[in-house]
Image: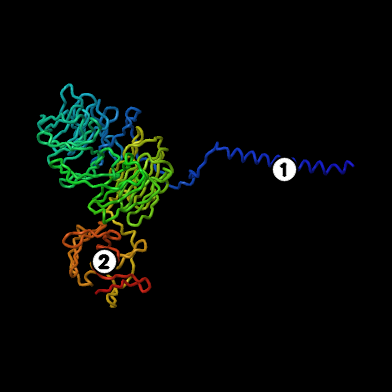
């Protein structure tokens, strides 16, 4: 009988064990689902294959503090660098790090500049400017009167400009005598000189706080004009025209995200105004300001609060020529540069770019933490991450050439002297040898690499002829060399290689196109006609989509992919 019960006890034991296992599993599942844990797919440290680097040399700098977080740029010239640390001016060889000399005491950090082979630096408290020669011998060249407080200085030729809490002074460096003094703007900084005018931005408070701009006569110190309205960002200065963002506060009736004024630098009057990016229906106009506005050439880039990026040609008729909307899920931070726009990744870790030519992405290798400092110099991108790691990358390929771990979280501006990269990292200066590929200056940005040759034949009213130079293709769009096609049709034209522009006449049709401009101008009235995509210079020839070529020349143009012919029919 006992034998009969033994299997039963064993069965109960197995059931109990299974029950305990199930309960334990359920308990673990419940604990996991209780929202007390977070994990994300992060790159393993062993997965980062970017090679490490060793500094050529290091030096001590003044450490930034909570009260003064600035890490000012170094003065770099002729293979040497100059900076103030501990109140003393230091000169070092950028290549070897050897200290060449030191000068002075109680000097102001970040004040060293190199002008005409001499180093100028200001005192911390004595309101003096010192000039030091290349051998380290120096002397005081000017001292403000007691009661004035020097905030900054700049030099233009033989003129020294001194900014104080109460205004701006001009001093002749040769004689040491004051030329004039202006009290129009407190603690001014000279943004630009146009002709004989010093352009000085200012912030003024009244019923509302506005940003404005003063033009001061560089010869007399007289105020020539003050800009009306509110403007805080100078986008471009071209001849006597200033392009500035109008940042007057929005109202309920505001229709656009961004407004740009064109200002006559001679008079300060607003010549014209243009608006960009209509405010979407249903959004409160009072909150619709741009994240950023940039002007490169005649192209305007406007980033909105929802990270949409719009590209306009400033001179385009917006009723005819629609803007390009450049979509990306990251945050636009820079560009165009090297034919690309640059973005922080959507998770704020790493950087990628999009080519303007075809919107394909370029990813930058190795970056695995948020960026603290990013600088583009020649063919290099230099990134300092919040974990202290520094990266040097090729802007064209995205390849990381080296990395180095510092103890810093914040970085000063990256600088290059010859083949040395200079890195400021919270009180420490590092110098690294740069690979040759990163020291090469970028040529004028060209998108040629995004385009591919397409072997094709021209069929003109049934007669075939090879196309030379060859057709090009991008994103399944076929582009034809304009000069070849127009001359085959009997058109006449003038071609300006420097301006990258062509004026074509065929019978009663005349039009002008220019590389990078998204419209053609037709007829004597210069009426704008939108193009499928802007013309582009490839192989030293001006190309445009075959559909645009046909409509502008007044002929029927069809791409026949089977026999690979551009079939053109006239009449």
Quarter of the rendering containing residue 286: top left
Residue at 85% x, 42% y is: 5
Point out which mark residue 365 bears. none
Residue occupied by mark 2: 551
Q: Which mark is residue 18?
A: 1
Q: Quadrant of residue 306?
A: top left
Q: Tag 2: Cα neighbours inside 10 Å, few (<14), some, or many (≥20)? A: few
For the residue labelled by badge 2, is the local secondary structure a helix, a strand or a loop? Answer: helix
Furthest toward the top, the residue is 146
Residue positioned most to the bottom = 463
Residue 330 shows in this picture: yes
Where's residue 18, x and y in %?
72, 43
Upstream in sequence: badge 1 or badge 2: 1
Up-down relation of residue 245 to residue 396 (above or below): above
- Residue 451: x %, y % from top left: 33, 61
* Above/below status of 203 relative to 265: above
Residue 484 visible in the snapshot: no
**Residue 476's x, y, as percent?**
36, 63
Residue at (24%, 74%) from the top-left corner? 571
Give residue 452's position: percent from left, percent from top.
34, 63
Secondary-structure class at tag 1: helix
Mark 1 or 2: in front is 2
Q: Is residue 360 above or below residue 248?
A: below
Q: CA distance from mark 1 to mark 2?
A: 79 Å
Circles 1 and 2: CB atoms closer than 8 Å: no
């Amino acid at each position: 009988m006992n034998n009969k019960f033994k299997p039963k006890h064993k069965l109960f034991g197995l059931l109990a064990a299974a029950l305990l296992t199930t309960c334990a599993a359920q308990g673990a599942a419940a604990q996991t689902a209780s929202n007390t844990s977070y994990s994300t797919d992060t790159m393993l440290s062993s997965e980062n294959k970017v090679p490490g680097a060793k500094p050529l040399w290091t030096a001590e700098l003044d450490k930034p503090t909570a009260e003064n977080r600035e890490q000012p740029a170094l003065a770099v010239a002729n293979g040497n660098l100059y900076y103030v640390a501990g109140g003393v001016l230091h000169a070092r060889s950028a290549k070897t790090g050897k200290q060449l000399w030191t000068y002075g005491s109680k000097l102001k950090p970040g004040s060293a500049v190199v002008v005409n082979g001499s180093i100028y630096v200001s005192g911390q408290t004595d309101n003096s400017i010192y000039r030091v020669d290349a051998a380290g011998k120096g002397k005081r060249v000017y001292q403000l009167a007691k009661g004035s407080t020097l905030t900054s200085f700049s030099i233009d030729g033989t003129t020294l400009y001194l900014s104080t809490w109460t205004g701006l002074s001009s001093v002749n460096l040769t004689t040491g005598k004051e030329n004039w003094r202006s009290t129009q703007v407190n603690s001014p900084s000279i943004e630009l000189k146009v002709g004989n005018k010093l352009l000085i931005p200012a912030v003024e408070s009244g019923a509302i706080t506005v940003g404005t701009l003063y033009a001061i006569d560089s010869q007399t110190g007289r105020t020539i004009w003050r800009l009306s309205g509110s403007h805080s960002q100078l986008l471009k200065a071209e001849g006597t025209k200033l392009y500035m963002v109008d940042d007057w506060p929005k109202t309920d009736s505001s229709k656009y995200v961004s407004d740009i004024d064109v200002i006559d630098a001679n008079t300060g009057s607003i010549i014209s105004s243009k608006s960009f990016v209509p405010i979407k229906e249903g959004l409160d106009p009072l909150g619709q300001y741009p994240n950023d506005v940039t002007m490169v050439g005649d192209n305007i880039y406007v980033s909105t609060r929802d990270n949409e990026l719009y590209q306009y040609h400033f001179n385009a008729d917006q009723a005819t020529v629609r803007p390009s909307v450049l979509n990306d899920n990251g945050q636009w931070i820079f560009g165009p540069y090297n034919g690309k726009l640059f973005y922080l990744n959507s998770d704020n870790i790493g950087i990628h770019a999009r080519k303007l030519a075809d919107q394909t992405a370029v990813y930058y290798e190795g970056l695995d933490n948020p960026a603290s400092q990013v600088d583009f110099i020649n063919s290099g991108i230099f990134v300092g991450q919040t974990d202290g790691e520094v990266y040097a990358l090729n802007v064209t390929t995205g390849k990381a050439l080296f990395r180095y771990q510092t103890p810093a979280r914040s970085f000063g501006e990256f600088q290059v002297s010859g083949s040395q990269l200079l890195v400021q990292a919270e009180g420490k200066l590092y110098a690294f040898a740069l690979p040759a590929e990163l020291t090469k200056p970028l040529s004028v940005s060209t998108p040629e690499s995004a385009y591919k040759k397409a072997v094709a034949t021209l069929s003109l009213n049934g007669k075939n002829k090879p196309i030379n130079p060859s057709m090009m293709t991008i994103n399944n769009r076929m582009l034809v060399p304009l000069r070849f096609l127009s001359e085959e049709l009997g058109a006449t034209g003038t071609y300006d290689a420097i301006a990258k522009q062509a004026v074509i006449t065929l019978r009663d049709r005349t039009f002008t196109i220019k590389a990078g401009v998204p419209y053609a101008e037709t007829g004597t009235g210069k009426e704008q006609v939108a193009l499928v995509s802007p013309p582009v210079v490839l192989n030293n020839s001006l190309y445009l989509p075959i559909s645009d070529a046909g409509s502008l020349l007044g002929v029927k143009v069809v791409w026949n992919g089977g026999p690979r012919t551009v079939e053109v029919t006239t009449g």
